[in-house]
Amino acid sequence: MKHILNLPRSLAPSAAVVAIVTAASMSGAIAAPKMLSLTAVDGYPPRALQVKTFINFFIPEVDKRLAKTGDYKIRWNQAFAGQIVKVRHVLTGMQQGLGDIGIVTTVFHQDKVPMQAVAYVAPFVTSDAVLLSRTVDQLAEEFPAMREAWAKYNQVLLTSFSVIDSYQLFFTRKVSSIKDFKGMKIAGAGLNMRYLTGTGATPVFGSMVHYYNKFQTNSIDGSMLWTDAAVAFKLVDGGAKYMLKADIGTANSKALTMNMDTYKKLPKAVRDVIHEVTALYRDHTGKLALSDAGNAYKKFAAKGGTIVQMSAAARSDWAKFMPNIAKDWAAGLDKKGLPGTKLVRAYMDKMRAANQPILRHWDRE
């Protein structure tokens, strides 16, 4: 305060002013936000839609909402592209505390979180990624066993969501119907390989990060994927120059979860913000999946790809040709004491209520 005391008396601030300035200064120090650290993980790189929207939407939106109160601030450690955990090991890594919040590709963990697969076992039902994501989140509220499955692995389920407008098939040669699948090696992530039952194709289980090399080395003849991912991972350059546009439908292939120990330690105000932003992130990602799809088809063609539209009759034939994988899957869950049949019926009821273009009513057979 020496510089104040040396001022002429007429210009020196009053004691009250000094007290206000001092109080304001002290208040500012006390109000500094508490710093929290969160490590976000996914095995996929930032070009994958769910990672891209997490970086560009989820993190900024959480930061913006926390800044409104100024009580907390998050220091984000972004560990994507396998920096900490590989694609198939996100759930295990999260369980062990290697990540605080992560994006789990659920098709790789049907043994651990089986009820997540409800849309996968009911293809040719919907291609609306936003509707699908919201529906599965509603089911998680109606069927507590869905959340309890995650809790067994020390996870809090924040949302189940889709990054897919619709599964298509990509081949090294022109294919127009399932009759052409015979003798072909077709790659996929998991349960969707059941769509190939009886076609004569050989299922090859894998992840899209490896499809390019598998096409290059002739290890596969085709893959089941959505177009935005096929473009992002340059499958045309790898040799998959033909798309069979079968419009199989979307599925909730991703789940955003938090390590339960981390979640419990977070202040309620921060947890509330994360839940609020999670719903927005889910819908934002689903909308982008749909809007990006149109551009993806154009990019696929521009890269030299050829799009073969599967006829309505051929799609219907394929849907009817499949075994009732939904019924079989549900019966398997029922035997384990899980509400499989009720879950499939609830899912289909919601899709019917939403007037979706259902080719096969899996729960009514």
Image (spheres, rainbow, N blue to C red):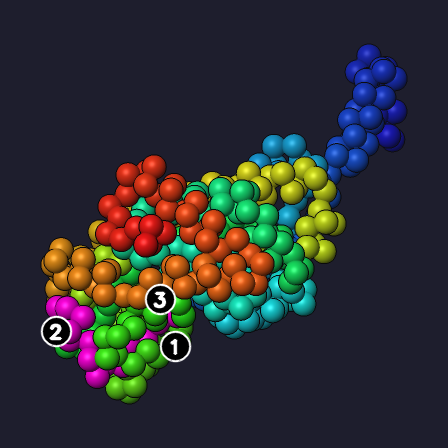
The vertical placement of 218 against 19, above or below, is below
Residue contact at pointers 3 and 1, CB within 8 angstroms: no
SS at circle 3: helix
Q: Tell me the distance, in whole angstroms, between the alpha carbons under discs 2 and 3.
A: 21 Å
Residue 102 in sight: no
Q: Residue 192 carries which label?
A: 3
Magenta part of the protein: which range?
A: 174-189
Mark 1 sits on what residue?
205
The vertical placement of 300 against 363, above or below, is below
Q: Which mark is residue 174?
A: 2
Q: Residue at x 60, y 39 (%)?
A: 273
List x then y, in percent, for residue 252.
42, 55
Nearer to the camera, 197 or 266: 197
Image quarter for residue 113?
A: bottom right
Tell whether 336 sits left or right of 360: right
Say which of marks 2 and 3 sits in front. Answer: 3
